[in-house]
Image (cartoon, grey):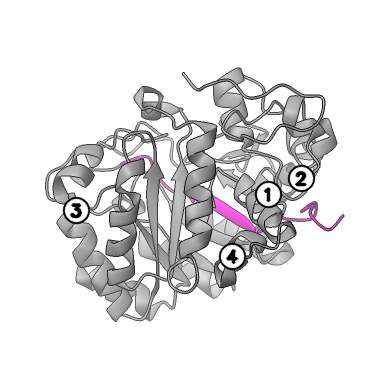
Amino acid sequence: MQFRFDAAPARIYWELTRACDLACTHCRAGANAACDPRELSSAEIARVVDELAAECQATIIFTGGDPLKRRDFFEIVAHTVKAGLPCLVAPSATPLLTSKVVASLASLRIGAMSLSLDGATPSRHDALRGVVGTFSRTIQAGREIVEAGISLQINTLVTADTIADLPAIHRVVEHLGADRWSLFFLIRTGRGQTLRQITPVQADAVMNWALDIGHGRPIVTTTEAPHYRRIELMRRAANRGCADGARSAMRGLGIRDGNGVMFISHTGEVQPSGFLPLTAGNVRTDRALRTYRDSQLFRGLRRPDSFKGRCGACPFRDVCGGSRARAYATGGDPFGSDPLCSYVPTGTAAPTAPA
């Protein structure tokens, strides 16, 4: 099927560590400053990278925590690049992210780097990140990444407390020269359980606005909001158009947790995503791609006809499918409806307001 990723994921998010020197209010991992002694070793990571490279060309995104907290970080990145896999890095904006680090990553020819920016001012951003000075470090690092010739993606949290700041954040991202701006629609897991979710109507408004502004750079994408594609398709059908920004939504057709996306935890657990903490295997005992291809969990997540409620009845279920992580975080069922979507298929009930 056109929108199924049965053979291999397109993206593998790899949590090298949960150690991080920030204290972000929405951290799914509950990160702290110390490394976990159970983390995968350098040799274990290299073995899994080689196994993946032998069977697929998935893009590897090294994340955390803060991947820079690992002493073998550059060894891991160099091995991945040498193996021929596209490699992206998502560090935290701490004093560890120096200009020398950026230059070293540029010399390794990584595909891109991402940074998080959750406020247009120091007070707004630093309040979410839990450490004063994080905003200025993010801006400085962003400039150095762009100057080094590395493609920059900025990630921004979308909650009831950040939604009003999005236009101002967009201007900052644009000024930095980022290639991509990813709007991460909150999943209430980890520390994020204390944050306020927006409503489905507000989510639609944000995604329509994102399509309106996404004509050039930065390209605007979404994380855990695949109904961005549904909105874009409906706009096309209505002949309203959305210029070149539509490309960002259309490229991801069908990709969601477990279908085109795989997550490897710091201890080797294989999960549909970092926001959907259901474990199907472990790379210490199972081959990652075999788990992705054959486990009951992943196979079910790649079959939208197994979804329930509005997502199961939705005519856009193949290209969208809703956030499986949000369905699980809200109702305990990864095959349930995504409560952040406003679309009501014939014969189904409207979504309830988020708690």
Q: Amino acid at mark 1?
A: Arg
Residue, disc 1: 230
Q: CA distance from mark 4 to mark 2?
A: 19 Å
Label of residue 316 in the image: 2
Q: Which of the image's four quarters has the N terminus? A: bottom right
Looking at the image, can residue 71 be seen? no
- Give, as a single range, the part of the protein colored magenta: 1-19
**Percent from the top left, x then y, of residue 50?**
62, 62
Q: Residue at x 80, y 52 (%)?
A: 4
Give the amino acid type for the residue marked by disc 2 in the picture.
Phe
Q: Earlier in the sequence, mark 2 or mark 3?
A: 3
| Between discs 4 and 3, the one toward the N terminus | 3
Kindly identify which numbered label has been placed on residue 135: 3
Q: Quadrant of residue 109?
A: bottom left
Q: Residue at x 76, y 45 (%)?
A: 316
10 Å neighbourhood of mark 1: few (<14), some, or many (≥20)? many
